[in-house]
Amino acid sequence: MSAQMIVDLGRILSDIDVLRERIAPAEYMLVVKNDAYGHGVDRVVAAAAAHGVRWFGAFDVPMGVRAREAAGPDARVFSWVTITRPEIAVALDADIELGVGDASYLEDIAAVSAGRSARVHIKIDTGLHRNGVRPEEWPAFVARAAELEARGDIHVAGIWSHIAETSDEDDDRSRAAFLDAIQIAEAAGLRPQVRHLAASAAAFARPEFRFDLVRFGAFSYGIRSTGGADLPGITPAATLVAPVSAISASGVEVAYGYLDGLPSTLAGRMSVGTAAGPRTVREIGPASMLIDPWPGAAVGDEVSVFGPGTRGESSVTTLAEAIGTVGEEIIVRVSPLIPRVYI
């Protein structure tokens, strides 16, 4: 046996159902950046599309193209990183809707589209400063977008933004700025089909942040926010399993082959799951770890390095909290060379 990441597609679909019910009547978008958070975009998107998911969000165009291929022609795929004109052409050929937070980028898309009415989602900076048109530049920006739409070069399908999700007060200010931006865009003659502001945490907790569409990333895979409470009905979908490779007086060695490396600072702070329950990790090396022994442990026994906790293992968010990061960082460090096994 070698290390594997077991991906439970049924759990992902169950998590999606919980989220869709939570935000209804707003639509749900499955975010699949970083190879669907390391779960494997091709299989995840195919399963979600068959389950009725209509919107998919990809940070970059290559991931968007893979999502399009897996989801089929009827899905809507949204990608928001700023790209070059040749990449814009690839995106438009794949019918990918582009997030636009810069005036010059809007001109690039219009030039490449040239009468094809490329679908774009224009982005207002509501205070996070993660791309997005500044409020003082927004009136001129939406006026130009309306001109390009009338010319047939673009179609403004959406207005969107990111928020910090650091405090209710900051988020309330962002929401107010977003509402102002919508009014200004509509006054310029734009009629966007969807408005989307919040991602997982704010949309899950606060109905007023859902608007027409919600982008759900980590929550869709059962990964809760760092410092956040467990989510009712949401279960982690991935379990990294690895075999016992040696037993000595020092403890039990587990060869997880985690080629991008578990942070060594997790030693003493994490538990793995075994047939005898949780065991503390004592040392972490480049591709193996040393854990506390248990009676009857044998070479080849399966150990759960992280997962939903059914055998006492830590979740990726619990690991992240121990070292001051987020669960997504832990799971996307799993090397693509480790096989994904789907159940």
Image: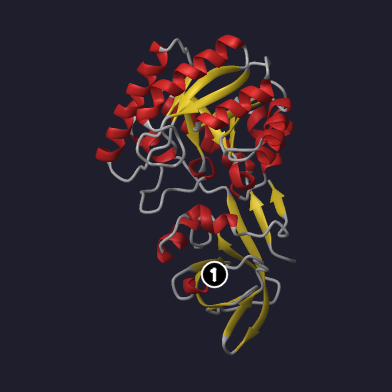
Quarter occupied by residue 157: top right
The amino acid on which the numbered mark 1 sits, given as a three-letter code, is: Ala
Q: Which residue is mark 1?
A: 276
- The residue at the far left in this view is 169
Residue at the (41%, 43%) spot, across then down: 231
Question: Is 82 or 26 nearer to us in this picture?
Answer: 82
Circle 1 residues within 10 Å: few <14, some 14–19, many ≥20: few
- Left or right, 287 with respect to 167, comes to right
**Up-down relation of residue 178 to residue 283 (above or below):** above
- Left or right, 49 with respect to 21, comes to right
**Up-down relation of residue 135 to residue 322 (above or below):** above
How many marks the image carries: the answer is: 1
Question: Is 294 or 223 nearer to us in this picture?
Answer: 223
Question: Is 42 or 193 nearer to us in this picture?
Answer: 193
Question: Is 134 or 41 nearer to us in this picture?
Answer: 134
Element marked by disc 1? loop
Residue at the (54%, 36%) spot, across then down: 14
